Image (cartoon, grey):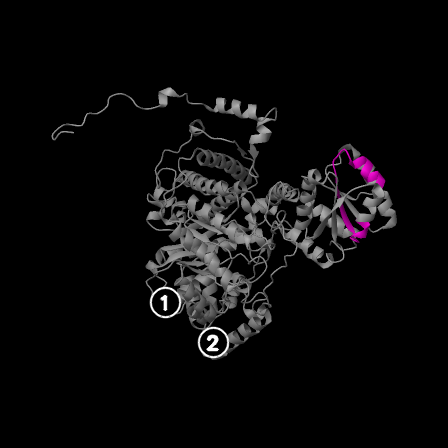
Amino acid sequence: MEKGESVKTVSKDTSLRSDFSYPGYEEWKEAATSSLKGKDFKRSLQTDTYEGITLDPIYTEKDLEGLNIDSLPGRTNFLRGQTVIGNLGKAWDVCQRMGAGIPKEFNTELTSALSSGQDTIFLSPDEATSAGIDPEDSSKGKVGVTGLSLVINNDINDSLKNIDITKYPVVFDTNVSGMELLMLFNFHMNNEEFDKHKIEGAMNFDPLGILSERGELDSSPEHYYKKMALMIKWAKKNCTNMRIAGVSTLSYHNAGASAVQELAIALSTGVEYIDAMSLQGISPEEFGGKISFRFGIGSNFFMEIAKFRAGRVIWNRILKEYGVPEENRDFHIHAETSMFNQSGLDLYVNMLRVTTEAFSAIAGGAERLTTNPFDRVLNEPSPFSRRVARNVQTILKEESHLKRMIDPSGGSYYVEKLTSDMVEKSWKFFLDIEKEGGVQKALGNGFLRKAIGEGRDKLEMSMSTRKNILVGTNSYGNPDEKFEHNEGADPFTIFSRRGKEIEDFKDLSKVERDGIDKCRLSDLFETGNPEVIDEGTEMFKKGATIGEITSLLKGDAELFTIHGNTLEISRLSETMEKLRTKVGRIKETLKLTIAVNEPFLKIKPRGDFSKSFFETGGFNSSMIRLEGPADGKIRKILDQENRLVVLCAADTDYPELVSSIVPVMKREREDLIIVLAGDPGENKGKYLKDGVDFFVHRGSDLPGIISGILKMSGVDNG
């Protein structure tokens, strides 16, 4: 090119679009249907989820028609997040539990965690503290074992010693002791002279959540609503950035609720709290910024993303109807990795589950995240497992750069359509709960227990038949695996130690304790004066215990129960874990032979399937090759001297093989347990009559068969 010559632009369209036709969905479906060779399109390529949502095999731009997804992050319906810049402004809070239950030990562990990636102070009290009971009135196992023991003023000071709580959000798992723990926390803020307006965090006060988990409250819900209202009124004046109400769906999630049910229950609980607070003189607008939502995170990656996105949309819609201005409609999410899907079998797989669950929560826009240690299902987690759990978040934040995301799934045809479906289904179930009279009544009349139970039954059946896989539990099992129990701290030692510490404290502070005006606390509470928080703080300062203050606030209130409608909380893997424990006791005496008929190479895949099936049940096996006449096959099987035998042959060979060898083997050895590999079809009755005990094939009930074998072996399955 000569100097000064201009670059000419090419006017001709060089795009290849005009040279190729753009296939639409119907053309793709036609091609897909053709490749299925007569199989049903819907059954083969569409998936019906646990939530009642049907997933298509492919999504296109057409699926976005009519969906309100044009808003920017932090705008309109908050579909795309609470803030304009997502995690770019401030990444999520790393909110991990500590293992220590003694305040001074807790402080040491927390200080180390805060220097190693944790950026939130999480105080999760033990059972006694959560119920407002002093150690001497409780029992071993409930004091300092399941959480932090917070009873007196020294406890909160020792727990937070030398930590600047204005630099980190402070989150309490208060259960029903929210007011008492707020008083104790206020004592610490006063004692250390912190500027309360700089304190951020949450008290997570959730009486209906505790009711769903325990089936009872030691006072009526109205008593706790009064507490909640007084805490909010006090916080409005003092700790302006502290959220008070905390809707937790962990009990529902861990009982097997679907993502749709979990979200709808959370929203309905939030509405019930709004209405309850309105009766206490707190407007929906005032309440809007004082509530946070805590969810479990399931294993369906995209469904969990959709759950959080849908939650923001519906909560925004609800608060808008209540007249709450947009700036107070935030849907603050504290997500926690699922205990429901964690397994005591193949423990280390839990690390992977936690990672994918955490990723989906972050992608869905959670503001706070707790990742559970991989061994929490069996033990008090070890320092190693706690460190790994925390580092999962650190890796996602620092190495995977998720702290630089702004709604990463926004615009995805699949996720946007799934979010829309989640909104529709959750809203429908929300309305069903409201028709029952709200969450409290839906718990009391068994509606929620029944709805969750029906869904869980279907899920457990799909687990039993291995339609849904829990790696290491119902598939890909290790028969030689042993449960790795860690005894942890001795509950009786901690119980005795804490009891002695509180007793000594009472003796040392006797003079000040004698000057406590107990009547004033009761009067302030009864008259609905938020200064009750300051009075309780003063009582803690003079040496009162959490049990004493709880008792004064409770008065003569009677136990409130939901009469047997408590949720059934258990992990998916527990049935198999119990069976595997029993198999472990007899596996040396009940060994397995897999007998593969000729032609060996053709039938061996059936033998391999059987081997995998029973290994998942905890049985070791040996494989033999059956050749020649029936007498030789019988002798080869019996020479193994194994009581459990799986016969593998072609379906067409089974009638003759079974009739020729099974009755003879049963006569020679009455305790023999014979399993046939394959679906027997119309021959099932004949095979059973000949002596076959069980059949294994795709769709077989794994725990049912293992349980049946144990029963035949004389092992109690109770």
Q: Residue at x 68, y 45 (%)?
A: 702
Question: Which of the pair 526/513 is nearer the observer?
Answer: 513
Residue for badge 2: 514
- Check residue 37 for magenta coloring: no
Q: In this view, does 423 lie above or below 273?
A: above
Placement of the C terminus among the 4 image quadrants: bottom right
Residue 59's x, y, as percent? 47, 30
Question: Which of the pair 162/266 is nearer the observer?
Answer: 162
Q: In what element is the residue under mark 2? A: helix
Q: Identify the magenta region.
A: 637-660
Which quadrant would residue 52 be assigned to in this image?
top right
Residue 416 lies left or right of residue 34; in this view the side is left
Q: Residues within 10 Å of mark 1 (few under 14, many from 20)?
A: some
Which amino acid, by three-letter code, is at mark 2? Asp
Q: In this view, does 477 lie above or below 451?
A: below
Residue for badge 1: 190
